[in-house]
Amino acid sequence: MQNPLDFQSDSMMTDINMTPLIDVMLVLLIVFMVTLPVLHHAVKVDLPKASSSPQAPQASPVDVSIDRAGAIFWNGEPVNAAALEVKLSQAAAQVDPPALQLYADRGARYDDVATTLAAAQRAGLTKIRFVLEPKAP
């Protein structure tokens, strides 16, 4: 007796079911179509050029201190206002002008600090550093 569900029992199935293969190929095609433009997207960036030449040593900074009484010290030695202007002009005339480090005591008058800053500006010094902790004389 023949099985009613087996209608082709006499012949062997010789063709391949192509539907799953086509589905997989379409999915791969869509994945490649989406990812390929992302892989080729680039942004032109101009990177800076580095030089390997050694930098010239900078001049050592000049310490100007103002104490509570208004006395001015140039690298630890006391100077008056006229001598300060001469020393500031000499420092500004150098090829590489040094930085001016200004130490002002907490009790120093604002007028003394402003006068010193104005003298440095008139002399042509542009690099001025304010040091917050007063330097011991």
Image (cartoon, rainbow, N blue to C red):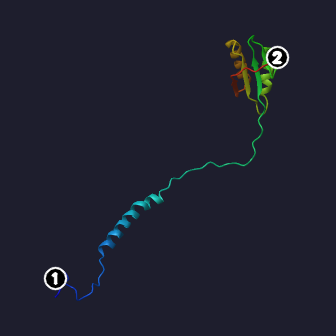
Is the N terminus in the top left, top right, bottom left or bottom right quadrant? Answer: bottom left
Q: Is residue 20 above or below residue 7?
A: above
Residue 87 image point, x, y percent? 80, 22
Side (left or right) of 7 relative to 77? left
Front one among 125 and 6: 6
Q: Decide: is 128 above or below 16.
A: above
* Residue at x 44%, y 58% (from the top left corner): 38
Seen at 70% across and 48% down, the residue is: 51
Residue 37 higher or lower than 72, as above or below? below
- Farthest residue toward the top? 69
Q: Which residue is nearer to you in this view: 26 or 126?
A: 26
Residue identifier under label 2:
78
Element on which disc 1 rests:
loop
Crowdedness of circle 2 by 10 Å Cα count: few (<14), some, many (20+)?
Answer: some
Which of the 4 image quarters holds residue 16?
bottom left
Q: Nearer the viewer, residue 4 or 133?
A: 4
Answer left or right for 4 relative to 87.
left
123 shown above or below 14:
above
